[in-house]
């Protein structure tokens, strides 16, 4: 990874491959940029690939204060400018990275060629899924206790993430910006909740999955040029479980005529 100092903080990034379109790979809250490497290896013969660690992740310095999606967007813009990375961009966002790519696409619409949302975070996910998580039981595994705490309460606290993300404000910023015009869009939805091993029974997983699928369907309406892939054999981290599904979403956008 290369390093750049912006406003006194070190940011780590990497540029791979060559091509007229720059693919920006944006991680979620629980992963580093390196998790995209399998995807990058498959597309860097046709595109320039930009990977980076946000402040508080990987090799980048931790943030000093809580930040929201718009502030993170500004960080990325400064990083792209300092690294001399130019549009057009194809944006790929996993989980919270989906929020960031939507903010980017709306603020720099003329620079964006397409958008791939991979198990993207939804503005209403905590209020809809949190109450549906099974209630505390004597036999439950610690992972379920932790999940319930985060989805019902912890997500509102910036210190829940090493990045100090202000999730409530970030999701408000995302929700305030509705459609994406005619931007080409590919939504990838996985079996996130059906794959969780610590839920008490299959019915619990299916109930949560149904809510998640409904929320993901909202993204399909963001553009009239949308494709939707459902992955029944992948968990939330599709870049780990089914990276080729992401590659297959990216390639047609790279090859499409201007």
Image: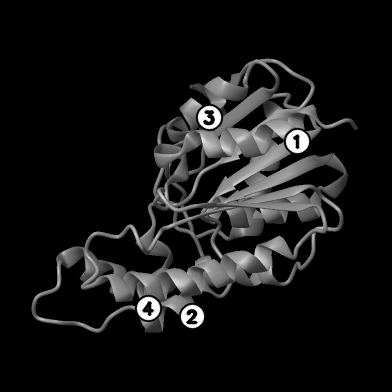
Residue 253's tag is 1
Q: CA distance from mark 4 to mark 1?
A: 37 Å
The residue carrying mark 2 is: 128
Relative vertical location of residue 249 with respect to residue 171 in this rendering, above or below:
above
Relative vertical location of residue 52 with respect to residue 203 in this rendering, above or below:
above
Residue 39's tag is 3
Which colour scheme appears in the figure?
A: one colour
Label 3: how many residues lie within 10 Å, few (<14), some (14-19) or many (20+)?
many
The residue carrying mark 4 is: 152
Judged from the image, the secondary structure of the residue bearing numbered disc 3 is helix
Residue 116's tag is none
Foreground disc of the pair 1, 2: 1
Label 4: how many residues lie within 10 Å, few (<14), some (14-19) or many (20+)?
some
Q: CA distance from mark 4 to mark 3?
A: 33 Å
Relative vertical location of residue 159 with respect to residue 242 in this rendering, above or below:
below
Callout 3–callout 1 Cβ contact below 8 Å: no
């Amino acid at each position: 990874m290369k390093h750049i100092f912006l406003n006194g903080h070190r940011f780590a990034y990497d540029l791979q491959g060559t091509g007229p379109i720059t693919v920006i790979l944006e991680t979620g809250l629980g992963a580093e940029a390196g998790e995209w490497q399998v995807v990058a290896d498959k597309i860097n013969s046709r595109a320039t690939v930009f990977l980076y660690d946000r402040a508080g992740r990987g090799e980048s310095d931790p943030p000093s204060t809580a930040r929201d999606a718009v502030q993170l967007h500004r960080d990325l813009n400064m990083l792209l400018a300092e690294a001399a990375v130019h549009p057009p961009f194809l944006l790929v966002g996993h989980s919270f990275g989906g929020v960031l790519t939507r903010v980017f696409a709306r603020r720099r619409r003329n620079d964006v060629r397409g958008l791939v949302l991979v198990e993207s975070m939804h503005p209403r996910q905590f209020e809809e899924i949190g109450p549906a998580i099974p209630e505390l039981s004597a036999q439950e595994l610690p992972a379920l206790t932790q999940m319930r705490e985060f989805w019902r309460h912890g997500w509102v606290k910036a210190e829940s993430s090493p990045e100090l993300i202000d999730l409530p404000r970030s999701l408000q910023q995302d929700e305030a910006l509705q459609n994406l015009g005619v931007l080409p869009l590919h939504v990838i939805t996985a079996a996130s909740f059906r794959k969780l091993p610590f839920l008490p029974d299959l019915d619990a997983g299916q109930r949560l999955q149904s809510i998640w699928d409904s929320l993901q369907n909202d993204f399909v309406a963001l553009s009239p040029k949308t494709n939707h892939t459902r992955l029944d054999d992948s968990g939330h981290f599709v870049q780990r479980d089914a990276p080729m599904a992401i590659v297959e979403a990216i390639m047609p956008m790279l090859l499409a005529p201007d």
